[in-house]
Amino acid sequence: MSTDSKFVQSCVFSIPGPIEVTDEVLFANAHPSMSHMSPDFARVFGDCIRMTRQLLYSEDAQPFLIAGSGTLGWDQVSANLVEPGENALVLHSGYFADSFADCLQTYGANVDQIKAEIGGAVKEADIESALQAKKYKIVTVTHVDTSTAVLSDIKAIANVVKRVSPDTLVVVDAVCSVASEEIQMDAWGIDVVLTASQKGLGTPPGLSILVASQKAVQVFENRSTPVTTYYGSWKKWLPVMKAYENNTAAYFATPPVNLIYAFHASLTQIMQGSVSLEQRFKLHKEVSRRVKKAAEEIGFKGVPLSEDVQANGMSALYFPDGFTASDIVPRLLKKDVVVAGGLHASIKDKYFRIGHMGVSVVDPSRGDIDKVISAVKESLAEAKVSKQ
């Protein structure tokens, strides 16, 4: 398929997902209609499964690629791995922990939360104390909470769980971290990584991506009660995923064919492109520091309480004293820079969020980051003048 033409977008889309995607991904998403049972599609789907596993540095974990949003990952975990009446421990660093807890409770789990202060991550000592006090089936942690831009140390958390409660499954909500933050699933002892297509993976929205360790799959297979979901049941999806990985089509529900082609194009760029995976993580760290430093120099302040809990794929910034979203965000939009407003209920009107992940980071020739930084500086300067 020719990609001589270029898609032209007048604005820089710098929210923390959906993000800017490459022309190659957009063209792949426009693939002619294709049967989901065809050998050609089965090969592409199989490649996606294999590359997804490789992206997380795993040898044998089981990917599930299903039409849906990242939220479907919560349902899969809640319905397939936790039986009604079992205990789940949710580590809270922002808005999305509350939602995961709500999902778990909907499926009958007994949920406890450990809540960090706004801008902070849950302390390892508190996790250890909770695990010593009660037996939990799973511990969930949001790797990067999109509401606060707080980065949790999932390697350290997994180590605590393995040491104190080795049978407990470690579940990572990585919707806002996969492909912009390093995740070594096997080496760190992580049992589930759930994510979605529209953030660091650089693909249009609509694909729920979950990867389960063989330990998690065994827990699912040994459950004593029926799975409490139909569409999200691994009993339905596991044979389908295994078939497609063997380049053979199988059917439970129609996969999002065009989106799989787009995902394949993005994964190919991430895993086989000129920028290695390790270089990609390094570039995200460098751009993150640059954006945060530029903002702080003119009076903005990061929501994360310290540098060690700052996400690399996004920034959450408090407005300088005397300024609100109405002073800054509309001015950014007039400069063709789209950002996201506050999401955390307790501080919603005090801050805004910038996404810097994917192609905007790894292809500096686009100038996306330069434009965002310049627009933030100019918008604040204009807002100051307007108040004089």
Image (tube, rainbow, N blue to C red):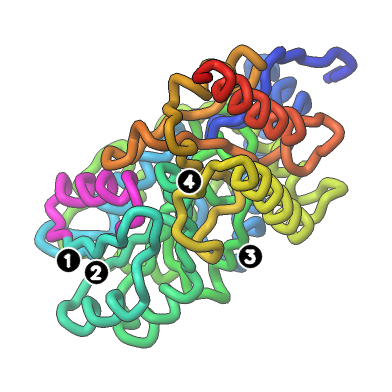
In this figure, which residue is indicated by the disc labeled 4?
175
Amino acid type of the residue tagged 1 in the rendering = Asn
Q: What is the chief secondary structure element of the magenta stretch?
A: helix
Instruction: Name the mark on residue 87.
Output: 1
Magenta highlight range? 92-111
- On whether residue 136 falls in the magenta region, the answer is no
In this figure, which residue is indicated by the disc labeled 2?
137
Q: Badge 3 local density, few (<14 within 10 Å), some, or many (20+)?
A: some
In this figure, which residue is indicated by the disc labeled 3?
57
Residue at point 60%, 52% (across, down): 312
- Name the side, left or right, on which 131 lies relative to 298: left
Residue at point 82%, 15% (across, down): 6
Residue at point 55%, 21% (across, down): 383
N-terminal label among 1 and 4: 1
Where does residue 171 sit, x and y in percent of width and height?
A: 38, 61
Q: Pointers 1 and 2 in contact (CB under 8 A)?
A: yes
Q: Measure the C-alpha gap from mark 2 to mark 4.
A: 22 Å
